[in-house]
Amino acid sequence: MAAKIVITRTIVEPISIKPKPRRKLTREEAGIRHGLSHFYAMKGVIEELFGNDEFMKVKMSASMAEWRKQCCRILDAVALSVKSTVHIADDEWFDEVAKLVSDGKTRVEESDTIDEMFARFSAIMTRIVFTQIGNMPSRYRAQKKVTLTPDWWTLDPYRTVQYVQNPRQRANLTARTKRRQEAAQKDPGS
């Protein structure tokens, strides 16, 4: 008589693993100091881009949440500017810029400290700038030293950037240049 073998299977459901909730760091732990001079260059950019009301939100000692919000807002402004300003480009380029902006916002939101956030923000903005010029170089395995010469920095293997001005734009530029020259003559120290 043959032995009957019974095989039973136990199905183990994966346990839902939730990431630990982010502990809210104090301003000091996050690297934020009270004072106008702390990150003033970035505060000035925020004022240039969005006006005095937004500058006032970060003027003296903004929270990490406010700094994240402002950096994400800058990335949103870049995305909107690309869509409304760049009239001729291939879909792949638009998709690439949109992905960089999306990734940048994710990295900014994930940052716990101000140094980490600005490092991530700077990295994504650098990638966006080079993508805007034509191509983000990828030289992880460069066999030679990368030097600042056109051989290394002509970034047109996929597309070429061309700025075009219509007569209205040329007139606007001429008027702006004239206003700046007049302002400089009135206040030579500025």
Image (cartoon, rainbow, N blue to C red):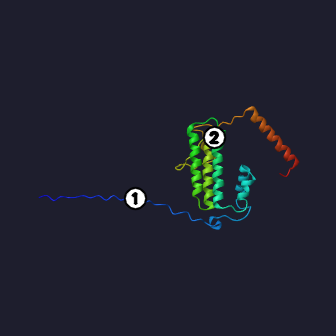
**Residue 180: percent from the left, percent from the top?**
82, 44
Under circle 2, the secondary element is helix
Task: Say which quadrant the N terminus sits in.
Answer: bottom left
Of the numbered discs in the image, which one, if any, rests on residue 14? Answer: 1
Q: Position of residue 100 (x, y in %)?
A: 58, 47
Res. 83 mark: 2
Residue 132 image point, x, y percent: 63, 43
From what the image shows, is residue 83 above or below residue 32?
above
- In space, the residues marked 2 and 1 are separated at their CA atoms by 42 Å
| Circle 1: element type | loop
The nearer-to-camera label among 2 and 1 is: 1
Residue 88 spot, x, y in % from top left: 62, 35
Residue type at numbered disc 2: Lys
Q: Are marks 2 and 1 in contact (CB under 8 Å)?
A: no
Please tell me which residue is depicted at 78% across the width and 35% down the height of the picture.
171
Residue furthest top as drawn: 167
Mark 1 surroundings within 10 Å by alpha-carbon count, few (fewer than 14), some (14 through 19), many (20 or more): few
**Is 187 positioned to the left or the right of 112 in the image?**
right
Amino acid on which the number 1 mark rests in the picture: Pro
Taking the spot 74% from the left edge, 54% from the top edge, the residue there is: 53
**In the figure, 13 relative to 100: above or below?**
below
* Image quarter of residue 169: top right
Of pointers 2 and 1, the one earlier in the residue sequence: 1
In this view of the protein, which residue sits in the foreground, 123 or 95?
95
Answer few, some or many: residues within 10 Å of disc 2's Cα (few below 14, many 20 plus, some between 14 and 19): few
- Residue at x 66%, y 36% (from the top left corner): 162
